[in-house]
Image (cartoon, rainbow, N blue to C red):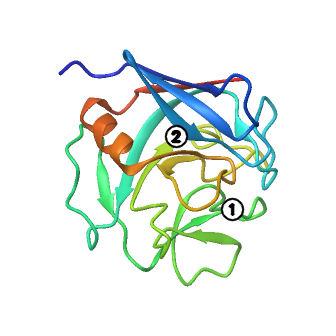
Amino acid sequence: MKPHNQIIVRRAPGSDPTSGLMLAGHEIYPCRLGRTGIAALKRESDGHTPRGVFPLMLGFYRADRLRPPPTALELLPIAPHDGWCDDPGHPAYNRPVDLPFAASHERMWRDDGLYDICLVLDHNISSRARNRGSAIFMHLTGSKPFTQGCIAVQKDVMLKLLPRLAPGTLVDIRA
C-alpha cells in the first residue's frame, strides 16, 4: 500500500465553518474543524484551525482502549500523567508535559475518547512562537460538531489512514 505524501483538508463547500473534507489519496472523508473555522493567523485559544502545510510528527494512543494501530508513525501510549502545555508564557509552551503541572495545560488522558488516537501536526512546534497556538492535533471526533482548532475524524477513518501515514506526511489545511 503506497503511503500518502499529503493529506488536504478544507472547509466543506456550502457548509458551516466547522465542517471539513479531507482528501487522502483518492478518498474523501468528512472531518471536523475548529469552532471558528480555518484562519491564516492562529492565536492561542481562538478556536481556529490553522491554515498552512504541517508535517505529521508522531502520535499517541490509549493502550487501555486499543492495540497500537499499524502505521509508520511513532505512536506512544498515553498515560494518566500525560499533558500538553498551552500556557504561552511557560518555557514548555506547546510541548508534552508530565502532570501534575502548575501552568495551563491539556490532559491527554481523556474520558471522552478524543485522544484515543491523536496525531501531532508540526504547527508551532519546530519553530515555536508564543501565543501562536498549541496542541494542534488530528484526533477522533466526539459529541461536539467542532474542535478547539484541531482536525477530527471518525475512528474508522483514522484506522484507514494510519497504515498510509508516515513521519513527514504533509497535512495541507486550506481555507
- Please name whichever residue, 48 or 106, is drawn nearer the observer in this view of the structure: 48
- Please name whichever residue, 56 or 151, is drawn nearer the observer in this view of the structure: 151
Q: Quadrant of the N terminus?
A: top left
Q: Residues within 10 Å of mark 2 (few under 14, many from 20)?
A: many
Q: Give the secondary structure at mark 2.
A: strand
Q: Which mark is residue 19?
A: none
Q: Residue at x 60, y 80 (%)?
A: 101
Q: Is residue 133 above or below residue 95?
A: above
The residue labelled by disc 2 is 121
Q: Is residue 34 above or below residue 23?
A: below
Q: Residue at x 33, y 35 (%)?
A: 161
Q: Earlier in the sequence, mark 2 or mark 1?
A: 1
Q: Using residue 61 as the reference point, say whether residue 99 is left or right of it.
A: right
Q: Is residue 146 above or below residue 92?
A: above
Say what amino acid the circle numbered 2 marks: Leu
Q: Using residue 10 as the reference point, say whether residue 120 is left or right of it.
A: left
Say what amino acid the circle numbered 1 marks: Asp
Query: Whole-percent x and y of residue 12?
Result: 65, 27
Q: Give the secondary structure at mark 1.
A: loop
- Please name whichever residue, 40 or 88, is drawn nearer the observer in this view of the structure: 40
Query: Whole-percent x and y of residue 134?
Result: 66, 52
Q: Quadrant of residue 100?
A: bottom right
The residue labelled by disc 1 is 86
- Please name whichever residue, 70 or 121, is drawn nearer the observer in this view of the structure: 70
Query: Whole-percent x and y of residue 106?
Result: 61, 68
